[in-house]
Amino acid sequence: MLNIPLVGVPKDEGTDPFFAMRAILASQRGSLAELGIGPIVTAGLIMQLLVGSQIIKVDFSNSEERALYTGTQKILAVLMTIFEALAYILGGAYGEDIGFEASMLILVQLLVAGFIILLMDEIIQKGYGLGSGISLFIAASVSFNIFDGMFSLSPEPSGGFVYFRGCILAFFQGIFNDEASVAASFSRVGRTPDLIGLMATIVVFAIVIYVDSIKIEIPVQHSQYKMPARYPIKFLYTSNIPVILVSALFANIYFISNLMWNNWKGADSGIKYFLVRFFGTWEDISGGTGNQQLAPITGLASYTTAPYGPEQIAKYPVNAIIYLVLMIALCGIFSRIWIDTAGMSSKNVAKQLLDANMQIPGFRRNPRIVERYLERYIPTAAWLGGFFIGVLAAFADFLGALGTGTGILLTTGILRQYYEIFASEQVSETVPALAGFLGLK
């Protein structure tokens, strides 16, 4: 779906309202996967905010309430698919003069493709596949973008010469051209992939793999047989969830700002003028490469969009600092909220340990005592892990990493999770008695 173009979309017309978030939303401009997992993630974000702010109250230990919560989220995802498909067309994402027939044709394609993505995610959730559908889609999309950034044959005009878009091919192409071309392949204008971004991609992969192995092991033992064991609490306790939620929030701000700019940029007074200035004004950052690339330079959208590459950071240092602060703070906040809504809090873990007839040596098997002991580690791990993942994602974006810093961060975690799933499956086949303990039955 990432490679199948939408029928009826004018070539190279209109702006891309989700360029900065393509990798994280598992989408591709002008393709059937235009919406990607945006509706699913947005629906989840809305429900998380409603629960976290106590606007709605859900007892996740109650199976009926949990099922109602899940069903409501799926209905909301369907509604968001319809809303985003309409918003794309009415907002001028494919040009303002495409006509009624072409608009309806594009709308039908977006809705059908969006519903197919929802159904594929549902299939994975029902147990017909491994892991999470959202995670699988993100990993596939980011892998596609990294490969495309290295080996794409698409032409990119620069300095009167046409280069390959793929940074590795452009480097070898420059070797046969001149020394200036080789130097240019390390840092290219606009959002074109370059070798600095490729290096940043490799570094981020290495850091995430290392940090994901950092953990604290709490000593536990079976209450009856006194068998010693250890319960691990990872530094990245909530994994990649905070970045997904923050990126979904930033993507919607980016989209709303683009929508307002396309329709109301000519307003010189009134509420429309205020909203456009508040959400952001846009300009072309392509640097004269021939392909127009609009990006927010002022307003809220500019503070929630990472400056791409060192040149953009030097040009907009205030925007870069505010983006970094927002990314770090929101990742920490969402990480802390997530452990309560996803059953990963100290209270939930204490209950799981006691239900499994485990106890902490030297402490009574009392839920409150075990919970108080776990409070020393779990909330702190949630906050610090969220902050760290925000810092890493932001700096990777600043260096122009292929697939975006957030996308690389998520893909690394997702691939590690799949490795652990495969290992668990192999163990359960070797020792069937462990299948229930590993949650595979």
Image (cartoon, rainbow, N blue to C red):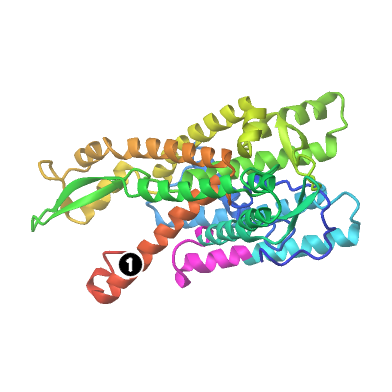
| Residue at (39% x, 43% y) in the render | 339
Above or below, 67 against 285 in this view is: below
Task: Residue lying at the far left in this picture: please name it.
Answer: 225
* Above/below status of 390 relative to 90: above
Q: Where does the image place residue 26, in percent across and percent down from the top left?
A: 60, 56
Q: Which residue is mark 1?
A: 423
Q: Position of residue 216 (x, y in %)?
A: 25, 44
Q: Does residue 60 appear in this view?
A: no
Among the 4 quarters of the image, the one containing residue 324: top right
Front one among 60 and 229: 229
Q: Position of residue 145 (x, y in %)?
A: 61, 57
Look at the image and give the residue range highlighted in magenta. 117-135
Query: As rendered, which of 390 and 113 lies closer to the eye?
Result: 390
In the picture, measured across the screen, residue 322 lies left or right of residue 343, that is right
In the image, what residue type sits under mark 1? Ala
Q: Is residue 70 magenta?
A: no
Question: Is the stretch drawn in magenta largely helix, strand or loop?
Answer: helix
Secondary structure, mark 1, is: helix
Observer able to see residue 229 = yes
Q: In this orientation, which residue lies closer to the viewer: 154 or 19? A: 154
